[in-house]
Amino acid sequence: MNLYKMELYKILHRKSVLITWLLIILWMAFYFFMMVSDEHTMINGTDYFGYQAIQKDREITAEYEGIFTDEKAASIITQYGFPCKVVRDVGGWRDSNFLTEFVTDRLSDGYLYGWNEGEYKIPEHLIPMAESELSIYLDSGLPFAYTGGWQKFLDHLQIGALLLNVWFMILFSVLFSEERQTGMRVLICTSDKGVTVDLWAKIGAAFTICLAAGLMFHGISFLLFKAVFGLTGGSMPASLVIGSYAGILKYTTIGQLAVRYSVIMLGAFLMQTAICIWVSSKAGNNFQAVLTNSMILLVPPALYLCMRGIFLRLLSGSLPFLLVQYNNVIELSSLYRIQLSVISAVLILGITDSRKNWMKIDSE
């Protein structure tokens, strides 16, 4: 236990580690603040911005929660009217709120693709649900609630996860290689017990930090979005919340997608840690370890863009940098169990081969 605590201290005491961790926290707090401050809604001619806009949208949507119907759509338009204001270079209807935007986008004859003539049409009439894209939900019923925070929550997790993967690479790339570079490995190898205990202390410390940081980040993000946006409507179809991937997500709820993404994200963190310690166990010095891990982290995105075969896309899309991008998780959703199997295999192989490399007594 003392050696385990010492390894935790060795990893975390470096100023660069603490500074980068603080920078990640500050950046994610700033990103969250910008997400909130960018919100805008208009209710009966009154503009609301930022936190107030979110709360007003939540307030007016609460009245219509439950199974969505044509009667609710008509009531929304009667009470708030169709949006009609378009501002160049500003996305969306500028006089809409959460309710009117939902109805206009899916149950009206209006559309908004751009700002030039012919690229948008001010809505005038409602379309029955039976004649719209929502018809597939008529038999089972379409759950409805305020979902304004879900995509922002996924975006927030994605940015933070990308930064954390880089942070893990900085932390764990030198886990074993530093001992070689400083000559400490020779002293550690003087007894079999010393090598074994040191090995598991290092691995245990690395995965403890990985899980603690990942769970802390995810927990704080969830609590922030829950407090401000509410994160209600988890049973709504994800395709209606995100506004894309209709074919893939039409029967997947936004709550299910968030849980699936969270599991994949934590798995990616564990995979990144396993890869880093494996490379470190083989590297002769810190520079070699950091360079190799950087290439493993950053090269797959480039390969993913140019690969067309499903096997090759799955292979490159099952590495840490792409696993933490929820668009990739959606596109490969049918291969979810295979991705989990790849993560498990990398974890097992990374740990076992790291042990083999570290236990090996060579000419050092």
Image (cartoon, helix red, strand yellow):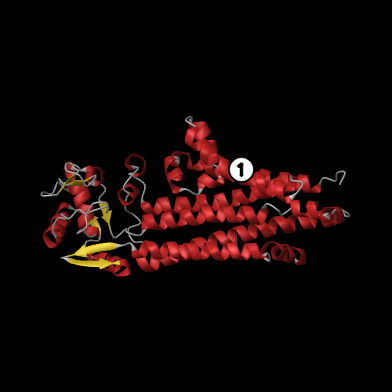
Query: Residue at the location (23% across, 51% down)?
Result: 88
Query: Residue at the location (60% across, 48% down)?
Result: 271
For the question of whether residue 274 can be seen, the reply is yes
Q: How many marks?
A: 1
Q: Residues within 10 Å of mark 1 (few under 14, many from 20)?
A: some
Camera-nearest residue between 301 and 214: 301
Camera-nearest residue between 118 and 133: 118
Q: Report the side of 188 relative to 238 (left or right).
A: right
Q: Report the side of 3 relative to 109 (left or right).
A: right
Query: Residue at the location (60% across, 52% down)?
Result: 270
Q: Quarter holding the N terminus? A: bottom right
User: Which residue was labeled with disc 1?
Assistant: 296
Please, is residue 172 above or below residue 279 in the view?
below
Q: Amino acid at mark 1?
A: Ile
From the top left corner, tell me how far across and down residue 116 is, in percent: 20, 44
Q: Report the side of 161 relative to 96 (left or right).
A: right
Please, is residue 199 above or below residue 353 in the view?
below
Q: Where, by quadrant of the figure, is residue 227 drawn?
A: bottom left
Please, is residue 20 above or below residue 263 in the view?
below
Query: Residue at the location (13% across, 62% down)?
Result: 79
From the top left corner, tell me how far across and down residue 163 is, in percent: 53, 55
Q: Report the side of 205 relative to 156 (left or right).
A: right
Camera-nearest residue between 255 and 275: 275
Please, is residue 5 above or below residue 362 in the view?
below
From the top left corner, tell me how far across and down residue 10 is, in percent: 72, 63
For the question of whether residue 317 can be seen, the reply is no
- Circle 1: element type: helix
From the top left corner, tell me how far across and down residue 202 is, in percent: 72, 57
Camera-nearest residue between 356 and 309: 309
Extreme residue toward the top, this view: 309
